[in-house]
Amino acid sequence: MKTSTVLSHPNIAFIKYWGNRDNALRIPANGSISMNLASLETRTSVEANPEFQSDSLTLNGRKETGTALVRVQAFMDLLREMSGNPYFARVSSENNFPQSTGIASSASGFAALAAAGSKAFGLDLSEKELSMLARRGSGSASRSIPDGFVEWHAGKKDADSYAESIAPAEHWELWDCVAVVTDQPKKTGSTEGHLLAGTSPLQAARVQDAPRRLEICRNAILKKNFEALADIIELDSNLMHGVMMTSTPPLMYWSPKSLKIMQEVAKWRKKGIPAAYTLDAGPNVHVICTKEYADRVRARLEKIPGVARVLISGVGSGVQVLL
Ligand code: DP6
């Protein structure tokens, strides 16, 4: 019997992952860049035990039986195959933030599961191998393994599709102020959404232009150039949502409230406040700003009608093994 406990953080993508070259292996159509979110946490424990008759999953204290369990079982099969260890596992995971609202719980969830699971199954994996493994559970989870600001190299096959840190968490004190407009789970999850990306006539152009956006974003982070970062992350978010809205069937993740917040943020930036918006597969708006402006941005967001609350976070570390 072996147990491991791991702490991980979700990440917010600056350059987005949307659509796969290989769905089974989660090899993405394009590379992506993100920052880990320090104050949002997932804690996951995995116990592998010869006495267990099947895998089990407890999420935030609730026993799961549906699709979440099936997804975790498939991931445990992968660990059994890699380790040659046939045991079943008991997985228990807790988040300190709401799930399924465009705040990527699958990213921190599978990053933690990869790290805790590999340890419980007796595997000693490098950061790169852990990132590749986490990717198989959820693509964006590959980016929650390394520290701080992270780039996921798209690659063409399993061995070259992994994420690595481009700058440590303390490199640049950026904050993410998440304007939560709903806690309702989204209707179409990312996994289903990725399958539709190729039906949009805009996806090919988005993917073709990705290396240029990645370079601008990487350089903006390295040089701490907020203006350049703001322009590229808003463009990239709009491009991804353009693809989503023009897929068959179309996916509309924005709500009228999301659009209102985006318009406000654009106005603030014109007035000199360093703030920029980005949205994942949900209506909540992530507003990225510099540390000095985080309190002001939060207060402004809270005043916008329809904003239920604002979560704020600085840049987080990679996955940490606690036990
Ligand atoms: C819009 O990593 O959640 O958040 O691999 O199917 O689990 P799966 O998808 P996921 O997709 C993330 C999509 C996104 C953009 C991003 O985080 O890059």
Image (cartoon, grey):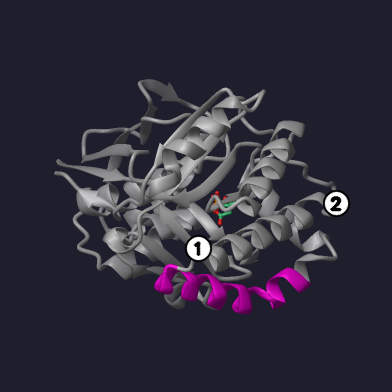
The structure residue drawn at horizontal position 78% and vertical position 56%, both measured from the top left corner, is 242
**What amino acid does circle 2 point to?**
Thr
Q: Secondary structure at mark 1?
A: helix
**What amino acid does circle 1 point to?**
Phe
Indicate which disc residue 248 carries: 2
Q: Quick check: 87 left or right of 267?
A: left
Q: Quadrant of residue 20?
A: bottom right
Q: Secondary structure at mark 2?
A: loop
Per the image, the residue denoted by label 1 is: 226
Indicate which disc residue 315 carries: none
Q: Quick check: 64 left or right of 43?
A: right
Q: Residues within 10 Å of mark 1 (few under 14, many from 20)?
A: some
- Report x, y in % for residue 145: 34, 58
The structure residue drawn at horizontal position 72% and vertical position 36%, both measured from the top left corner, is 260
Q: Quick check: 108 left or right of 217?
A: left
Q: Which residues are magenta?
A: 205-224
